[in-house]
Image (spheres, rainbow, N blue to C red):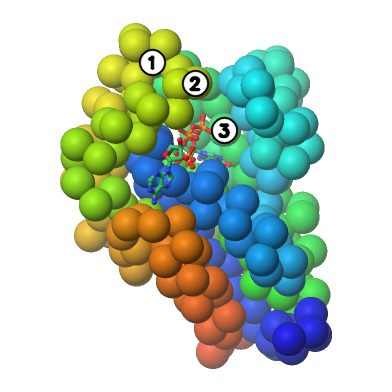
Amino acid sequence: MSFDEHRHSAARLTVLSGPSGVGKGSVKALIRERYPWVWFSVSATTRSPRPDEIPGFHYHYYDRAHFEKLAGDGQFLEWAQYANNLYGTPRGPVEERLAAGYPAVMEADLQGARQVRKAMPTAQLVFLAPPSWDELVRRLKGRGTEDPETIKRRLALAEEELAAEAEFDHTIVNHSVEQATEELVSLLSSPVESSAACPASNL
Ligand SMILES: Nc1nc2c(ncn2[C@@H]2O[C@H](COP(=O)(O)OP(=O)(O)O)[C@@H](O)[C@H]2O)c(=O)[nH]1
Ligand SMILES: Nc1ncnc2c1ncn2[C@@H]1O[C@H](COP(=O)(O)OP(=O)(O)O)[C@@H](O)[C@H]1O
């Protein structure tokens, strides 16, 4: 399929959420490799890059003062503090993509997903869930990128996130990266029927 075949008069925004370690990054990586027409927002964060992360591709890495300045200027579609760091979705690129008629995908934690739900009611919220709690713990620890204290904090947040699954429009259980990827891609192209597809200008 060509890029143009994925264009709709009312393209929609999809928000991907899920607990730390569930596999969001793995699914994103496979989609980027296999489906170049799928556009992912690049979030901003104040956390430090992990060894295999590339600035501008995985995240824009900003210090807290710069992030807060952008937030104060209304440059984020949504933003939130997760654990000790700030994360946000740059507003401009998402709005441009949707205005051009292409679907857009962004990642956000639960607070961010709730903000998008309010600001853009036509966005679809997708929750990536682990096959089990034990498997989530195994994946998060197995990634080897966080120290034990950070893992503990992220697992505490994961309990809250899993409890909020019913707020999402769709749940995809990440049994395998391949299966989760295909399920997510199949949700992306459904156009929004009404003219309400345009993002709200303010949160
Ligand atoms: N609100 C918000 N959360 C984000 C954004 N980008 C990533 N996150 C979330 O921030 C949390 C921590 O992300 P990260 O440090 O990359 O850890 P990971 O989820 O374990 O890979 C996760 O819940 C992400 O989904 C964003 O732009 N906005
Ligand atoms: N379906 C899966 N089965 C087994 N391991 C997985 C699966 N999806 C992801 N992983 C592994 O789990 C760890 C966390 O995945 P990651 O994509 O970093 O999660 P997130 O971005 O949600 O924090 C990584 O080591 C990754 O290779």
The quarter holding residue 33 reads bottom right
Mark 2 sits on what residue? Answer: 145
Specify which label sits upstream in the sequence, 1 or 3.
3
Residue drawn at 70 percent across, 16 percent down: 63
- Nearer the observer, 173 or 11: 173
Mark 3 C-beta to ligand 1 under 8 Å:
yes
**Label 3 neighbourhood size at 10 Å, few (<14), some (14-19), many (20+)?**
many
Label 1 is placed on what type of residue?
Thr
33 left or right of 170? right
Q: What residue type is labelled 2?
A: Thr
Judge whether 132 appears above or below 170 on screen: above
Question: Residue 142, position in %: x, y?
Answer: 38, 27
- Numbered disc 1: secondary structure: helix
Earlier along the polypeptide chain: callout 3 or callout 2?
A: 3
The CA distance from mark 1 to mark 3 is 16 Å
Residue type marked 3? Tyr
First in sequence: mark 1 vs mark 2? 2
Ligand 2 within 8 Å, label 2 CB? yes
User: Circle 3 is placed at which residue position?
Assistant: 87
**The quadrant where residue 22 appears:** top left
Where does the N terminus fall, quadrant-wise?
Answer: bottom right
